[in-house]
Every structure is written in structure tokens, then in C-alpha cells.
Image: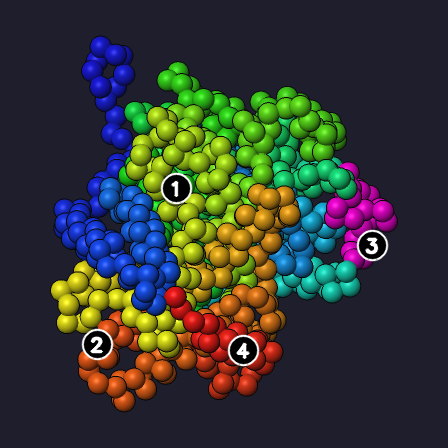
Amino acid sequence: MSAKSGEVDVPPLFVTKAAKGRAAHRLLCFTIMVGIVLIWIYRLGHIPGADRPGRYAWVGLSVSEVLFGLYWVITQAGRWRVVYRYPFRDRLSSTRYKDKLPGVDVFVCTADPTLEPPMLVINTVLSVMSYNYPPEKLSVYLSDDGCSELTFYALLEASEFSKYWIPFCKKYNVEPRAPEIYFGQSSPLHESDFRQEWSQIKTMYEDMKRRIESAGAKGCVPREIKDQHKGFLEWDSKITKQDHQSIVQILIDGWNSQATDIDGNRLPTLVYLSREKRPGWAHNFKAGSMNSLIRVSSEISNAPIILNLDCDMYSNDPNAIQDALCFFLDEKQGQQISYVQYPQCYRNITENDIYANASCATFKIELAGLDGFGGALYIGTGCFHRRDSLLGKVYSKDHRLELNSVEDNVKGRTVEELEAASKPLADCSYENGTLWGKEMGLVYGYPVEDIVTGLTIQCRGWNPVYYNPSKNAFLGVAPTTLDIALIQFKRWSEGMFQIFYSKYCPFIYGHGKIKLGAQMGYCIYLLWALVSLPTLCYTVVPALCLVQNVPLFPKVSSWWFIPFTYVFAAKTAHSLVEDLMCGDTLRGWWNLQRMWLFRRTTSYFFAFIDTVSKHLGFSETSFALTAKVVDDEVRKRYEKEIMEFGSSSIMHLMIGTLAVLNLFSFGYGIKKVVFSTPEALAELVPQIIVSGLIVMVNYPVYEAFFIRRDKGSMPSSVMFKSLAIASVACLIPMY
Ligand SMILES: O=c1ccn([C@@H]2O[C@H](COP(=O)(O)OP(=O)(O)O[C@H]3O[C@H](CO)[C@@H](O)[C@H](O)[C@H]3O)[C@@H](O)[C@H]2O)c(=O)[nH]1
Ligand SMILES: [Mn+2]
């Protein structure tokens, strides 16, 4: 910067670099595109005459291939301009920024003490309370949509335990700072002060865990404990999850110099919130809870930076705040940055990731690709926000980060005064007639509140950042059964398709506000539900036509066979190489292919159906919470990477039926190979290959049908239904 402008030239706090190999990748894309166009030309030029069978099937496949091709073009937005971000944490620690560190409010959301056990929740809370960050600038808020006395009790215990845990963490620099994980990982070898303290803290932790879990088993908090804190008075006999007043309890008043740990150091502020719920009031799921958190925290600490976490996402890096601040505080580019999104990584991924939860390529490449177009997604957790942009402010040049401290904001008020002042902000009626949920805070009406909110923030002129550090900053819990995994994807794909169908459709809403690449990038996800249709067509039609000897592809010996083979091989090889480069195993990649098929034919398809039925007014938006705990037997199977089919859900029926159908057609194909002339065979070979591939991918389904006998195998009712539906389908003539 020139001396004229009066600013000093300072080294940047972060840099952005383009990924390597862009030219080679673009060349590959080009060849694939040529192949896709050739396929379209072939389809158009070879439609069977009205007198030949398979005309409709042909049209179906053609439409599918056009949709696949267009969708493929859209997905290129995630790979065209990949960029990586590199913050310089060390530069931030220079004296230049010492007194410029902003306050940080951490929001943790929980919604159900059974699906999200209090111990899990407080581990997350403890991990963020012990960040290497000045405690007087750090406040942690827990929003409990479950309004559970047990969760409150656990948080109260955690506030006591933190007085020992935080100094222990900082003194010995232990990691990670979620005690459950830490104590489960290692133990000090040598006799030392450290070891002694380690055992003390561990015992203390286990005692606390026992108390909390026994209260959980009884379903209530013991009387003698309840008498120790005024907060329990809120839970009278009438309270239920769906019907209760606002509860705000400040458990640690971090601005008070008396609130210290056992070594006399200040503690971060800790607040419990359960917003009001009343029958008949829409509570807008997580978005509603986040908006209450924004308001309540503004009354208490009002930090300019907000970190938003799901209750299962513990902090794995005690210095993560510093990294994120490098982006916000950078002199030149920081002003415009609205949020810094981290990838959603999991702690419980097995070696070959049977349910493909890790999505390496998505997190390592695609999201970084969207960032290249200025379209970094907000994915709901692991995200640092600027309070102002989250509140709905439009970006402007003279915007600055208010560096107020908790103390300034509290203005000498007592804990009771603050609680009383913030409760009304969490009441149902508070938002009436305001812009909350529309132009302020998180957007209401979509089960993926995060994606749509991120989009609106970008359209207001802000520039978010996607940052994927080599050391995971947060680790959550991934689904451990097929059903849970598919239901999660159903919620996502449904929510995203609803956005596509709304006024927020990126091509319309984002037009002229964000780059075309970013608009397309959003649609990679928003169109998930729609790609279920061509995928279903491809898994059903070639198989049905095969059993009736109706050819749908060019002969193997024809030139036209080449583009089909090339597009398939190039895309497959590309995804394999990409996945292996991202650190996945070969089996992991194979599992991903299976989950790709399962998700598209179940989650996305049912999401599509539900979206349409909602559009017609048959049903309402819901939010199916992802369970974070399963019973021991199920967990063991997950750890052994055995697929869990043990329920007769519609998802399983769909998967089973498609698997059986392709097994039939593949069997029929093999019979043909053995008994027919090469002439009669040549036309059907491509379909035999398609069915063969589907059969290979579906191997665990047959195993669950015919071989396995454990509780995670497919219920026999599902098997009989699948067999029946597939057999009937094979008898329908194809015209
Ligand atoms: O009414 C609700 C429902 C959910 N939650 C919380 O929202 C978080 C996410 O719910 P979860 O069931 O774990 O969903 P996931 O499928 O893991 O969520 C992903 O997708 C969601 C959008 O569908 C985002 O909100 C999440 O941040 C993102 O992690 C959890 O902490 C819940 O406690 C609430 O606070 N209130
Ligand atoms: Mn989750």
C-alpha cells in the first residue's frame, strides 16, 4: 500500500492459491464433453421406428442421458477453479494484533437428550471452552431445543469441571480438548506430576460422567442436586419439550473477575438457553434456534465473531479461532469476508468408510472449487460468522469489526438482570412482524437453513471463505446405519431441491449478484433430488429391456460404442484417481459408488416425491434429527464394516427391488451369452454390462438377503416383496 493512503505495508494474514493441474483437468473435461455430445447425437439419430419395440425406453434413456450430461456440466463448477487458502497464524500472534482480538461467541445446538446424549453435548462445550483464546473474550452458548433438565444438569456439571479441565489443558497443552476423546486416547507412561494430575482429572471426569448418566438412566435429576441451583426451578411439572417458557441461565459470568478456575484464571462465559416453544407456533428447527442464540448473545456478550457448531462437533484444534481470525482481520481482504466455513469431518469413520460419510472429494475439491467462484457454502456447523453479515447487513466498504468486550456490553448489569433482559428475545412472539428468518439471521422454511442462508449472505455482497486445514478443526459423529445415513441425505436433498424451486433459486436470486460459476456450484447440490430420476431410469430400463431382448445401446462392434465406453471409463477413472488422491482407499471408493447409487435411488428419489407432494400441499416441512448413538451390537457391525439393513423401511425395499431386478436381468444375460449366437448377442452386451455393474455394486444387498443371518440382515418381508415386485416388472412388455 502506498504511503499516501496513510497505511503501512503489512504482510497479509492469509493467501489464496490456485490448485495445481488445472490445464490437464480442463483438457479431460473437454474430451468428456465431446463424448457426451456424441452420445446425444447417437440417441437422436437412432430412435427406433414406431413398429419396433423399445421406443419409449429409448426416449427415456435419451432424456436421462441429456439430464446426466447437463448435470455433469454443472458439477464442473466444483472443479474448474479450485483454490486453497493458507492463513498465517503466527503473524496474528505478533503484537500488532494483540489488543485487536475480537470477542468470539460459540453457539452449540442440541435438540434431543436421547438422540444427542448430554455427555456428547458437554464434551463439545468443554472443548470450545478450552480454546487457547483470552477467556474474557470467549462466550459459549448452548441452545437446547429439547428443553431437557438433564442437558441443563450436564452443563452445570461441565461448568464446575471446566475449572479443573481448562487449566489442565493449558498447562500441559493436551489435545484434543474433549475429555471423553482425550482420556480414551492415551495415558502418560512415566511417573510424573503430569501423570498424577492426569489421573486426578480423569477420575473427576469419570465421576461426573457417572452422575450424569445415572441421572439420565433415572430420567430425572436428584432432588439434592436440584436444590443447589436456581436454574432447576424452571422445570416444573408442566414443562414439555413442545410447550415451555424461555429459559436463559448464565452458568459462568466470565466478565466477573471472581469467576475463575482453580488456578485463579478467568473463565469463558457459559450460557444455557432453551427458547420458548408453544403448540401452534412454528419453531423453525435449527434456524429458529440459531436466531434466538443470535439475539440472546447480543444482549449478553455481543461478540462480533460467532462460531456455530452442532452438538456432536468437538473442537479438535485449540488454536482454530486464530486461523479463522486471520481471514477476518486481514487488512486488505478481511473486510468483505462474511464467514469462514470448515469442512464437516467425522471422528468415527472406519477404514473403508462403508456409508461414504467422509466424502473426501467433496470436502477437499468440490467445496474449494466453489470457493474459487466466491461461492463457499455455509454448511451449518464448523463455521465462523461475522455477526453483522449473519444479521443481514449488506456489505459496504466502510464496514468495521466492532471490538467490544463482554464487559462493555454487560454494562455492570447483574446475572439476574441479564437473564431477565434476554428471555423475551427467545420468546415465540418476539419475531412477529420482524424480518427475522427472512432478511435477518438464518432463513426459515427450508430443512437446509444453512445453504440458503449462505446464499443470501453472498448475494448481499459478502465474500465467504472455505478453509480446509490439514489438521481437522472440528470432528463430529457420522451416521452408523444405512437408514440413518439415507434419511440424512433425504433431508438434505429435499431441502436443497426446495431451495431450487423457490425464489432463492441461485440462477434467479443470484443473477447479477454472484458469479455464474457459484450459481452452478450451488446447483450441484440443489439438483440432487432431480438426478434421482435419470438414475432410476438407468437402473431399471436397460435391465427390463434386456430380459425382453430389446436392445438400447449400439453394438459393441459399432463406432458409436466408443463414446459410451469413453465417457463411462473417463468419469470412473477420474473419480477413482481423485478419491485416492484425497486419501481414500480403493474399497472406500467402491463403497462410495454403492452409496452413490443407493442415495440417488432412495434418498434423492423420495426427496423428489416429497417435495412435489409438499408443493401440492399434502405435507409439511420437517427436520429428521440424525441419531448420534446406536446400540452396541449395531455399533460393532459398523466397526466391522458390515452394512446395516435390519429394518423394513421403504428405503431398503427400494434398494432390494433394484438389486433383485438387475440380478434377474444379469442372470438372463449370462444365459444368453451361453446359448445364443454372437450375432444375437452383440446388441445386448452393453445392457448385460450395465446390469453386471449394478449387480457387482449391490453385492452386500444379496448377502443381506440370502447369506447373512444376523440382526442387521435384510428382513425376510423385504426380501419377498422385492422378489415379487422385480418378477412382475420383468413381465411387463416393453414398447
Ligand atoms: O429443531 C432442531 C433440529 C436440529 N437442531 C440441531 O441441529 C444440528 C444438526 O442436526 P443433525 O440431526 O445432526 O443434522 P445433520 O444431518 O448432521 O446436519 C447437517 O445438516 C443440517 C441441515 O440439514 C445442518 O443444520 C447441520 O449443521 C449439518 O451438520 C444438531 O446439533 C441439532 O441439535 C436444533 O437445534 N433444533
Ligand atoms: Mn449432525
Residue located 57% across and 57% down the image: 626
Q: Between marks 3 and 1, how big is the CA–CA gap?
A: 53 Å
Residue 213 is covered by the magenta coloring: no
Q: Which amino acid is tagged 4? A: Ala
Q: Which mark is residue 724?
A: 4
Q: Amino acid at mark 3?
A: Glu
Q: Is residue 242 magenta?
A: yes
Kindly identify which residue carries mark 2.
682
> From mark 3 to mark 2, how far is it between C-alphas?
81 Å
Q: Which numbered mark, 1 or 4, is in the foreground of this view?
A: 4
Dot 2 amino acid type: Ala
Nearer-N-terminus badge (3/2): 3
> x and y percent of residue 699 in the render?
40, 78
Can you see residue 523?
yes
Residue at the disc numbered 1? 522
Residue projecting furthest to the front = 51
| Distance CA(mark 2)–CA(mark 1) | 42 Å
Q: Earlier in the sequence, mark 4 or mark 2?
A: 2
- Please tell me which of labels 2 and 1 falls first in the chain: 1
Q: Residue furthest right?
A: 237
Quarter of the rendering containing residue 543:
bottom left
Which quarter of the figure has residue 274?
A: top right
Query: At which x and y percent is residue 322?
Result: 40, 39
N-terminal of the two: label 3 or label 1?
A: 3
Residues in magenta, as a range: 220-245
Residue 623, numbered circle: none
Query: What is the crowding at mark 4: few (fewer than 14 residues within 10 Å), some, or many (at least 20)?
Result: some
